[in-house]
Amino acid sequence: MNRRQVLLNAATTFAQVIGSAATLFFLYRFLVRTIGVQGLGIWSLVLATTSVVTLANQGFSASIVKFVAKYVAHQRIEEVSVLIQTTLISIALAIFAISLALYPCARWLLALVLPAGHLADALGILPYALASLWINVVGGTLLAGLAGHELITYRNYVVLGGSLLFLLMSFALVPRYGLLGLAYSQIMQSGASFLATWFLLRRKIPQLPFLPRRWDRSLFREMFSYGIQFQFITASQALREPVTKALLTKFGGLALTGFYDMASRWVFTFRELIVQANLVLVPTVSGLKERDPASIPAVYRQSYRLIFFLAIPTFAFLLVASPIVSFIWLGHSEPVFVLFVALLAAGWFVNVLSNPAYVVNLGTGALRWVSIGCAATALLNPILGFIAGKYFGGEAVVAASVFSLIVGYAIVLVSYHFENRVSFDQLLPRDSIGILVCSLAGALIFLPYFSRTRMQSLFSLRLASIGTLALLTIVVIPMWVHPMRKRLIHWVFSRLPA
């Protein structure tokens, strides 16, 4: 595999996630002050409702990454062009038909869970949400084409540029148009990202016409046979968020939904920081399956060790810093926000640890246990969420959602070790125990302190900064002496251009 390209893909993915997190940070602070937490809850619920549209795309996106990588490995460039055109035409027509069918269903669902006073605002932005999602889904196919060429660097530039454009347009339009301004901004972001991706892909594949016009039945069947398995996986994943938000709105109210959305974005940003850099290995694993399948177990072992090395301190930090984030976004430390961050951090931590197994399964096409794990999450989430919400309130809905997430991805992780006869001792690398102990100690010490501190003055903010630096010091010391740090630095510098 081209290790330098993998490094560049991972580095720019890291930069893209950091940049997107920064824009999200400023955006949420701005939105809370302009449309309020309830307005943010309405926006979040509408997007969650319409996100069902993305289900039709996920199988094809996974297929295009895998099969583009396969045909590029065999130098069959003309088939790559036809493959992308076939996928683009199929997805565009399918998403358009699904959007038309979804519109009345989404209106009914919003009327079911929203208070009457907020329904008009939600229905007003619903058509724009569907339009932007249609553009995003079709554009996601093109981004998958870049990823299949291992040109994830270009994809990262497009995603980061789109995030910055969304932030700037929101600053300009939301104060004047409210929620509609946010919808306008998202459509502009989606359209600009689509055009930029199409331009970059045509530069890489000159055989692509200005407008897609070729559709190949045999290529469609090949992608469909793989994609239909992945379609089920992503459908079960995508349904978790709208189901959780609908139950949370019904049993907890719009304010809790707004807090949940903010906590989810905060945790998910750090999850993406770790996972997206690892996902660059999907086309790499797919290529290795064609050329050198014996090297895949080593890729898994090193990937898991690196994920564990990064995930423990990352999740400890995002949990401890949550009261400070709450103060910056909301103007005070909100206990519900901190609780949601703690719950979601536990769920996404298990998801992150299962990611190396998930990536290898995607690259090799072994999707049976991934499907079973995601199905378990999809079944448990609405059942447990409804029972928990009815008897214990909105916070219990989030706890049930997190529990279902943990169960599903634990199945993925454990099954990979069983299927491939990988020792379970590797799940807790011995050289990372020091990082685990220090991270847990730092969280137990500093989270109560930050939660109690009233950061209303410059003095208290300075104390919070000192506490954050102390936490980082406690965590960084064992990371610095860890052998993975030396290997990682050596690996990076040995592959940089002279």
Image (cartoon, rainbow, N blue to C red):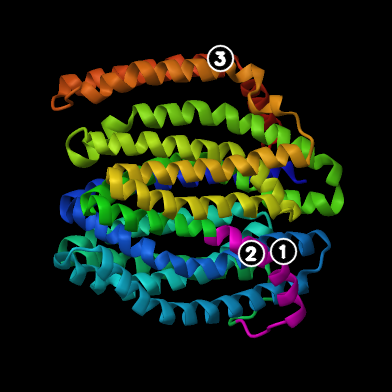
Q: Nearer the viewer, residue 495 or 428?
A: 428
Picture quadrant of residue 122 = bottom left
Among numbered discs 2 and 3, the one appearing first in the sequence = 2
Going 64% across and 80% down the picture, which residue do you hit? 209
Q: Is residue 324 above or below residue 405?
A: above
Q: Position of residue 452 (x, y in %)?
A: 21, 22
Which kind of residue does numbered mark 2 sit on? Gly
Label 2 crowding class (10 Å Cα cut-off): few <14, some 14-19, many 20+? many
Mark 1 element type: helix
Picture quadrant of residue 246 = bottom left
Mark 3 element type: helix
Q: Position of residue 152 (x, y in %)?
A: 60, 53
What is the span of residues highlighted in magenta in the rendered image? Answer: 212-235
Q: Is residue 396 left or right of residue 76?
A: left
Mark 2 element type: helix
Going 36% across and 49% down the picture, which residue do you hit? 387
Which kind of residue does numbered mark 1 sit on? Val
Marks 1 and 2: in contact by CB < 8 Å? Answer: yes
Going 18% across and 26% down the picture, which residue do you hit? 455
Judged by depth in the image, the label closer to the viewer, 3 or 1, is: 3
Residue wearing tag 3: 434
Q: Residue 484, which numbered label?
A: none
Q: Is residue 274 above or below residue 384?
A: above
Among numbered discs 3 and 1, the one appearing first in the sequence = 1
Q: Is residue 219 magenta?
A: yes
Residue wearing tag 1: 68
Marks 1 and 3: in contact by CB < 8 Å? Answer: no
